[in-house]
Image: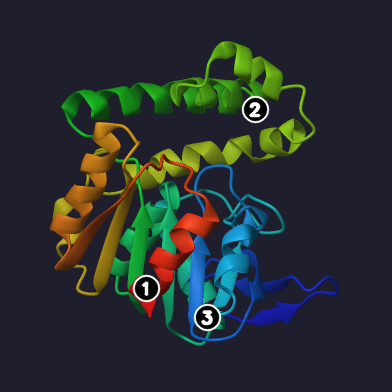
Amino acid sequence: MNTQDISGDGVRVTISDDGTKIAYETRGAGPALVMVGGALNDRGSQRPYAEQLKSTFTVYTYDRRGRGDSGNTLPYGAKREVEDLAAVIQAAGGAAYVFGHSSGSFIGLLAAASGVPIMRLATYEPPYAADEAGDALNTQIMVTLEGLLEAGQSEEALAFFFSTTGMPPAVIEQQKHTPHWPALVAKAPTLIYDYKLKTACGDARVPTGELSQVAIPVQAMAGGASPDWMRASSRRVAYAVQHGTYLEVPGQGHMVPPEIVAPLLRAFFS
């Protein structure tokens, strides 16, 4: 059973099934909405979204395991992140709307397929592989990333991850001299978690069999300016679940601004 504690700085803590402490905070009033961030995100990354939505919802933002003030019980397993989300939903009253961005969408979808009490689920660009070649590339990335992390080379792993997203070497070098670089390096060991979530059902492609068990309404969103494979991934998610819709957001890429996505979430959840 999950328990809850309140710390002096307003951060709340819920306990996941394996005993890991999961830190979260809330904003606003109304039905519960849990935000699940992607790679390198923590609860602070989701605050701008919470600010946009707090007039309609009680917005829960949390540190995924291994980030911020949350624990990091090992060994890691994708199921643990599903349990973490379930613990936050339990703390939110037992049922909630959920929005997952990028790899945070993996958690929302896996949780919905597992029967976690999610009322409606919105996703934005879960980066599943589009085809067999994409799956093979994902495997190569995982092997390289895991090797760097096991060797204790977190900074190199972070730079490698950024290179796989298409970030130019000169920009990566600039990032190394920014004030937020050390915080990103501290979260780098969790990057492998995002890849393990992607492949939790076998390979890195959309797990259509598992998603066919999702009976709640799902709105799968993607940016109109994002790559074709990323939009295709969201379309496949929408088709795989029982009650899915696909929504393309004109002119947007992977990092959609809060003021753009908030009205879409409000319309879907309300």
Q: Quadrant of residue 6?
A: bottom right
Q: Foreground residue, 239 or 226?
A: 226
What residue is shown with label 1?
267
Mark 2 burial class by Cα count in 10 Å: few <14, some 14-19, many 20+: many
Q: Looking at the image, is mark 1 or mark 2 earlier in the sequence? A: 2
Which mark sits nearer the N-terminus, 3 or 2?
3
Residue 173 occupies which quadrant of the picture?
Answer: top right
Which residue has dot 2 on it?
154
Q: Amino acid at mark 2?
A: Ser
Whole-angstrom CA distance, mark 3 to mark 2, is 39 Å
Give whichever of 239, 85 is nearer the camera: 239
Distance CA(mark 1)–CA(mark 3): 11 Å
| Residue drawn where x is 51% and y is 64% of the image | 35
**Structural distance between the alpha carbons of marks 1 and 2:** 40 Å
> Callout 3: few (<14), some (14-19), or many (20+) C-alpha neighbours within 10 Å?
some
Residue projecting furthest to the front: 251
Frontmost residue, 236 versus 93: 236
Q: Is residue 71 above or below residue 201?
A: below
Point 69% across, 19% down: residue: 174
Marking on residue 53: none
Mark nearer the viewer, 1 or 2? 1
Q: Position of residue 44 (x, y in %)?
A: 67, 56
Disc 1 marks which amino acid? Answer: Ala
Disc 3 or disc 2, which is closer to the eye?
A: 3
Residue visible at 38% across and 62% down in the picture:
108
Q: Which residue is mark 3?
A: 56
